[in-house]
Structures are given as structure tokens and as C-alpha cells.
């Protein structure tokens, strides 16, 4: 470093897809680092592929034949001259074998060491590390070996009784609520166990599961950490992520509101001591459950990666998490002023999932005719789709995120509601109309919501439908403001052909 | 709520956002498509049924049927022809977007045909299992 050799030109392979890949590519572009996209059959025409400097086809659409294939990712990187890999979230982001394989190539892995992702990604080991670091944990039990026989199911039942229902059956390598089941009585255990295992196997290629006490009602609060790998840790505030469906976050905000200062401090100190105890490297999130009274918190897990909801931290605290990750990955350490930042604003995010919140969040797939996003000050859109994109059943339902930032919580809330009202993802169903109603609720305004609130209190929610008597008005408005398709052949076209359905689609 | 035709007025059109005052209340819509086949979103939700012949691919299928509720892969078939099942019993598990969705029997009955096997790719609305009536079971 002394006589300033030309800094190496980096090419980062983005081992991810969709919204995640788009966001990472944008962040690397901002600092002049080249990117390589990798894609499956289904993602051939995806915006993230076009956005990258270079791209490589991985294989068939199922993730197990594309985004989860370490060997295919390595050959793509070799072929296109990768010098670094960013794993994003999901897929291989917390897979220690992947981190190891990348470092074996002599490439930079933009993430924690393989040891960190192994130990902290394994929820059982993570719990014991947390306990050693003085972080409060809930009661839990891990089976000694894989359970298949009836006798072993019985062992699960006994332990569940001992810990006390309700309990969680949870994937040891899990995340994002996948491979996790709430079990309220012994009878539910027999079905939950194999289901959690199958889902864990499909999502994380590891079917080990364990048992944990389920705290209910609880809020989900998490602390953003960044480590330099040598024991220096920065805490970049916290986030509230209690509004969840199927244990997956739907609405997130930073900083967490309505928390007593001492509790917030204690939580951040816990996160710091866990990260410090392992000399954590890179961005990570320590997740906690906070009880109803807001007094006691318990370690949930540590995610050794960038989180989906990192934009709210970026907007509220004025940082760029991807740039910080890159700094640390290059060995340049944590920039001055990163630790203990005070929030400059309040930021709230809604995940745009292609699903129907009125029918059990059933996936809604197909071709998107219009992707219309709001603009304006304080509105940020992180999207993986565009008009004409096809949402397939192969991957996670999240297609984009809308992030609204204001000088306080009420202002951010109003901006996000308005942003939702001026968004259109036709003809798919998405999570945002539910998000709008959540944001408008008294419970949201007064911060009285918990991880199960959507399931418990919003199960009867239905999609907004314009009143019948407005339909004539809307047709009249459409006639006034919309322009007919430019081609004169429009009128001569026979009705009901496939061309009718394409009308109005922009290239 | 009044039975008279609502009074309305366009306040603003900044494509694709249309602001209309309807009976004194301001409503915001996202409007795309053509005059003959407009597409609307309201409160963040696509409004599929404004025009006759509009795309209804987003309409939910009725729950409790033995057809696939979504496109995906059949993960497990839990019954075979001739099995007698109770209402609510899981017949088939379909996986999409990494979520497992159990398809349950809408009523009690006897399985008269199983149309899929594990690993099959299914479209939304595909038949999975045919359920015959079981006259003796009235619960």
C-alpha cells in the first residue's frame, strides 16, 4: 500500500437474482466496481441481467439447478474474470462451503468468514455463543441425531412438554421463516416435523431442525452490526420488523419506535458483545424478540449477511450498507463515524410480494403488464421487475420494496401510504394493499403490534374493490385521459385474440 | 351511500396517476392501458373486473377444492385411489416459491382418482385428485 500501486480493478460476481441482484449491482456501479450477473432459464430477460456489466447463464430454472450450484457459480466467475463475490441474501449467502470455495479461488467473499457463517448460521451453535456472550436466550432443545423412528418422535413430544407449548420447530440452518413451524400441541408435532424438514432441505439443503420456546406475543427487533474481523464492531441502530406473515417480514422500519432507552441500549450492547466475541467480519444482524411489556428481550438468531430490509437503516442513518460491506471486505476497516450513529430520519419499508394477502398469501404468478412506481422526495424503490417481466413460481415471492423516509414516523407513514396508492403491479396481486391498511391502522400508529398480529387480527382482510357505482366514472375517465393505441389497425383487429391482451404494454 | 349517481370531477391526471373527486372525496387511481381496455389499481390493488373480458387470471380460485391453487410442483401425494378421507384432510402438498401449500379435502369422501404424482409440475387450476361422494358420511 505504501507506494500506491494501481488499485486492482475488481469484478464482483453477484450470486443472486431479482431485486437483490438489482440492488447490489446499483450499489457497485455507484463506486465504479464492475459486476457479473448470473441467471437461470427463468431469469434470462430479467432487469438485473441487463444492468450488470457481464452475465453468465447458470442452468435450469429451479434454484437447485442454478443459484444454489456452487460449481456452476465458480465456473461462471472463472470464465468472466471475477475477483470477488457478493452472495446477497437467501440462496448461498449463509453457506460456509460457498464462502470457502470462493476464498479457495483467491476471490474476495463479501461476507463473513466461513467459520462465522457456519457457527452463527447454525442456530444451535449461535445460541450457545450468544449465551457465552451474556445475551439472553429462550429455552431450547436439539435432538441428538436425526429423528425418524416413533421413539424419537416421542422424545420430541417429551421435550416440547417440558419446555411448554407453544413451541417452534426450527431449521438449524434456517432463515426468513422457512423450515419453521409453530406447534401448539403434541398432535401437531407429527405433521410439523417432516414439513419443517422438507422445507429446510429445499431452502437450505440441510434438514436438521430443533425445538425452541415460542414467545407470544412478541415484537421482533433487530440490531445492525458491522465488524472488521479484528474485533472492532460498529452498531448502526436497530429496526422494528414485527409485522410479518408466515414468519416473513412484511413491513419494517428504522429506528425501532416505542422502545425504552435502557432496553434499546441493552439490546444493542448484547448485539455488540456477541459480534465482538467472535470477531465478526462484515454486515450482520442480531435479531431479538421483545416481550409484550417491552422489558425482556431474547436472542432469536444472528443473520450473517445483508438483510432484505437494509434500506431502512440506510435511509434513517445515512449509510450505504453495500459500500460498507465492500470496505470491510477489502480490508479497509470500518469508516470513522459509523458506530453509534444517531438516526437522521425515520424510514419504513413495505415488501412487494407477488401474492394474495386475502387468500392466505397464495403466490400470484404471471406476466406483469404494468409496473408503475411512485416517485417523489423520500421515496425509494428497490425493484427486480419491470413492465413485461414474468413472475415464476420458482423463487421467493418478493419482487420489490417501497421505502419511504420522513423526518419523523408519522411523516414516513403518510409518504408510504401515498406511495402504495400510486403503485400498480397489474394484473398480479401483491402484498401492498394489505400494507396500506396496516399502515393506516391505530395499532400501527401506536406501535401495538406483534409478530402474529397479521395472522391473528387481519385474517378476514379482503382486497379493496372499487364500489360498483364508480365503475362508470372510471370508464369515462379512461376515455378522457388515455390515448388509444397508436396503430390504426387496432379497430380492425378481431376481438379476443392474443393481441388484445398485449394492448398498452410498453416495450 | 346515496342512491343518486355520484358527482365526480377529474382533479389531476399525471400519467399514470389519476386523481378524481367522487362525492367530495379525493380518490387516487393508477390508470394504464387503452380507453377501451383500461387497467386500474386502487389503494395498491389491481382492480381486475372493471371491463367485461378483463384479465381475470389474478382471481383467486375457491379454496377447499381439489385443484391446484397455484402453479408449482407436487411435493407429496398423501392419498391413493379408494382411500376414504375426512373433510379438511390433506390430500396433496404443492410447493411454489419455496412455500408448501397443503391441498385439503373440501368434504368427506372416497378418492376416485389421483391425477398427479410427486414431482409433477402443475398449473393453477389443474386437477389433482377427484373426490367421490360418500353418502354414508354426513358430518
Image (cartoon, coloured by chain):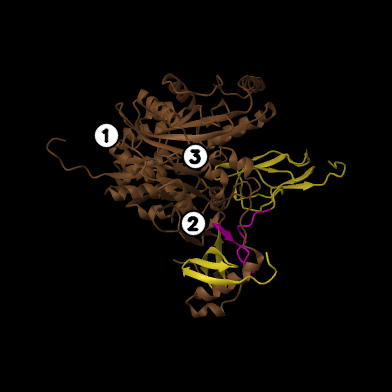
Tell me the shade of chain A: brown
Question: Can you tell which of label 1 and label 3 is closer to the viewer?
Answer: 3
Residue A280 left/right relative to A249: left
Q: Is residue B112 visible?
A: yes
In magenta segment, residue A331 = no
Secondary structure of the residue carrying numbered label 2? helix
The chain under label 3 reads A
Instruction: Name the residue beneath numbered marker 2.
Output: A418
Residue appearing at x 55%, y 19% in the figure: A144
Pick whichever of labels 2 and 1 is earlier in the sequence: 1
Taking B10 as reference, is A242 above or below it? above
Q: Which residue is mark 1?
A: A333
- Label 1 neighbour load within 10 Å: few <14, some 14-19, many 20+: many
Which segment did they paint magenta?
A: B43-61
Residue matched to label 3: A241
- Chain letter for the residue marked with disc 2 in the picture: A
Q: Which chain has been coloured yellow in this picture?
A: B
Is residue A92 visible in this depiction of the protein?
no
Q: Is residue B49 magenta?
A: yes
Q: Quadrant of residue A428?
A: bottom right
Secondary structure at badge 3 equals strand
Amino acid at each position: 500500500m505504501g507506494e500506491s500501486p494501481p488499485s486492482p480493478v475488481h469484478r464482483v460476481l453477484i450470486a443472486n437474482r431479482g431485486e437483490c441482484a438489482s440492488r447490489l449491482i446499483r450499489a457497485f456501479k455507484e463506486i465504479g466496481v464492475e459486476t457479473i450477473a448470473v441467471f437461470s432459464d427463468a431469469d434470462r430477460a430479467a432487469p438485473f441481467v441487463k444492468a450488470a456489466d457481464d452475465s453468465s447463464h447458470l442452468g435450469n430454472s429451479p434454484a437447485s439447478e442454478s443459484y444454489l450450484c456452487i460449481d456452476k457459480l465458480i465456473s461462471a466467475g472463472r470464465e468472466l474474470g471475477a475477483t470477488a463475490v457478493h452472495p446477497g441474501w437467501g440462496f448461498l449467502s449463509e453457506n460456509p462451503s460457498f464462502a470457502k470455495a470462493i476464498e479457495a479461488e483467491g476471490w474476495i467473499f463479501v461476507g463473513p468468514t466461513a467459520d462465522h457463517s457456519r457457527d452463527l448460521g447454525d442456530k444451535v451453535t449461535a445460541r450457545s455463543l450468544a449465551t457465552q456472550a451474556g445475551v439472553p436466550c429462550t429455552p431450547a432443545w436439539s435432538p441428538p441425531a436425526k429423528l425418524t423412528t416413533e421413539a424419537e418422535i416421542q422424545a420430541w413430544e417429551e421435550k416440547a412438554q417440558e419446555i411448554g407449548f407453544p413451541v417452534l420447530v426450527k431449521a438449524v440452518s434456517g432463515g426468513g421463516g422457512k423450515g419453521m413451524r409453530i406447534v401448539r400441541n403434541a398432535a401437531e408435532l407429527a405433521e410439523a416435523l417432516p414439513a419443517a424438514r422438507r422445507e429446510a432441505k429445499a431452502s437450505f439443503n440441510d434438514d436438521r431442525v430443533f425445538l425452541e420456546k415460542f414467545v407470544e406475543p412478541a415484537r421482533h427487533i433487530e440490531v445492525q452490526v458491522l465488524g472488521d474481523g479484528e474485533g472492532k464492531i460498529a452498531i448502526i441502530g436497530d429496526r422494528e420488523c414485527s409485522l410479518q406473515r408466515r414468519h416473513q417480514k412484511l413491513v419494517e422500519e428504522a429506528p425501532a419506535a416505542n422502545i425504552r432507552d435502557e432496553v434499546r441500549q441493552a439490546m444493542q450492547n448484547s448485539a455488540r458483545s456477541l459480534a465482538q466475541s467472535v470477531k465478526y467480519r462484515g454486515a450482520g444482524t442480531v435479531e431479538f424478540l421483545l416481550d409484550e411489556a417491552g422489558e425482556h428481550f431474547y436472542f432469536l438468531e444472528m443473520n450473517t449477511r445483508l438483510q432484505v430490509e437494509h434500506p431502512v437503516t440506510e435511509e434513517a442513518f445515512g449509510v450505504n450498507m453495500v459500500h460498507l460491506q465492500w470496505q470491510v471486505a477489502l480490508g479497509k476497516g470500518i469508516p470513522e463515524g459509523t458506530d453509534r450513529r444517531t438516526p437522521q430520519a425515520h424510514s419504513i419499508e413495505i415488501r412487494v410480494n407477488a401474492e394474495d394477502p386475502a387468500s392466505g398469501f397464495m403466490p400470484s404468478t404471471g406476466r406483469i403488464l404494468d409496473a408503475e412506481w411512485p416517485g417523489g422526495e423520500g421515496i425509494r424503490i428497490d425493484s427486480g421487475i419491470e413492465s413485461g417481466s414474468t413472475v415464476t413460481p420458482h423463487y421467493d415471492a418478493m419482487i420489490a420494496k417501497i421505502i419511504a423516509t420522513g423526518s419523523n414516523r408519522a411523516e414516513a407513514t403518510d409518504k408510504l401510504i401515498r406511495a402504495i396508492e400510486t403503485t400498480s403491479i397489474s394484473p398480479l396481486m401483491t402484498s401492498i394493499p394489505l400494507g396500506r391498511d396496516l399502515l393506516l391502522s391505530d395499532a400501527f400508529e401506536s406501535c401495538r403490534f406483534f409478530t402474529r398480529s397479521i395472522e391473528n387480527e387481519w385474517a378476514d382482510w379482503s382486497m379493496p374493490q372499487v364500489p360498483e357505482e364508480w365503475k362508470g366514472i372510471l370508464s369515462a375517465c379512461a376515455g378522457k385521459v388515455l390515448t388509444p393505441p397508436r396503430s390504426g389497425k387496432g379497430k380492425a383487429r378481431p376481438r379476443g385474440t392474443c393481441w388484445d391482451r398485449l394492448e398498452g404494454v410498453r416495450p | 351511500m346515496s342512491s343518486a349517481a355520484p358527482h365526480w370531477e377529474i382533479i389531476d391526471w399525471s400519467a399514470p396517476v389519476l386523481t378524481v373527486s367522487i362525492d367530495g372525496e379525493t380518490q387516487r387511481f393508477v390508470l394504464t392501458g387503452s380507453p377501451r381496455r383500461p387497467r386500474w389499481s386502487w389503494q395498491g390493488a389491481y382492480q381486475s373486473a372493471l371491463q367485461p373480458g378483463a384479465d381475470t387470471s389474478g382471481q383467486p380460485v375457491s379454496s377447499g377444492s381439489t385443484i391446484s391453487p397455484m402453479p408449482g410442483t407436487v411435493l407429496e401425494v398423501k392419498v391413493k385411489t379408494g382411500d376414504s378421507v375426512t373433510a379438511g384432510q390433506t390430500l396433496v402438498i404443492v410447493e411454489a416459491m419455496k412455500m408448501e401449500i397443503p391441498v385439503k379435502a373440501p368434504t368427506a369422501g372416497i378418492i376416485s382418482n389421483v391425477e398427479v404424482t410427486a414431482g409433477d409440475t402443475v398449473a393453477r387450476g389443474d386437477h389433482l385428485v377427484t373426490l367421490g361422494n360418500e353418502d354414508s358420511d354426513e358430518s
